[in-house]
Amino acid sequence: MFVVIRFRVPESAQLEFAERLAAAVEVLGRQKGFVAARTGRNVDDPELLALNMEWLNVGSYRRALSPYEVKMVAVPLLSEAIDEPTAYESLEDAFGGLGQLP
């Protein structure tokens, strides 16, 4: 499963935000079930930033938010996200292995 978390951050605050984001990814990356993370800035709206993470399953992702160090480092940053659903299952899993989807 994967997670897409978006943030609206003024360009003048992005350097400091990127440092906080890197710290959050580092602590989340040590949690069981973490697979990968990628961060980025929207090419059409430079104030829109995204954190995309991959986890083994939704349970791994949800449990990863519980440890004390995650609550201290990552959760405050994640609370600044745009309020929208963030967890996705792949269509291959949802529809039983659709062979042509990436």
Image (cartoon, rainbow, N blue to C red):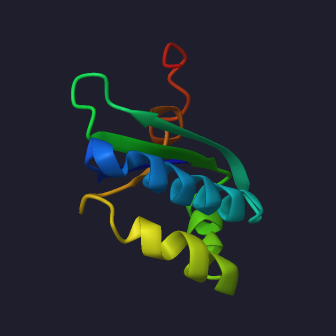
Query: 7 or 93, which is in the foreground?
Result: 7
The reply, left or right, for residue 25 in relation to residue 80 is right
x and y percent of residue 28 in the render?
A: 66, 62
Q: In the current view of this chain or complex, which residue is farthest to the front?
A: 12
Q: In the current view of this chain or complex, which residue is farthest to the bottom?
A: 68
Q: Is residue 48 above or below residue 28?
A: above
The reply, left or right, for residue 47 in relation to residue 97 is left
Q: Is residue 14 above or below residue 76?
A: above
x and y percent of residue 17 in the render?
A: 44, 55
Q: Residue at x 63, y 60 (%)?
A: 23
The reply, left or right, for residue 87 in relation to residue 80 is right
x and y percent of residue 50 in the render?
A: 40, 43
The reply, left or right, for residue 99 in relation to residue 7 is right
x and y percent of residue 45 in the render?
A: 22, 31
Q: Is residue 32 above or below residue 39?
A: below
Q: Residue at x 53, y 19 (%)?
A: 102
Q: In the current view of this chain or complex, which residue is farthest to the top?
A: 100
Query: 14 or 94, which is in the foreground?
Result: 14
Q: How many marks?
A: 0
Quarter of the image holding residue 77?
A: bottom left
Q: Residue at x 43, y 66 (%)?
A: 78
Query: 40 or 19, which is in the foreground?
Result: 19
Q: Residue at x 53, y 60 (%)?
A: 20
Q: Is residue 41 above or below residue 37?
A: above
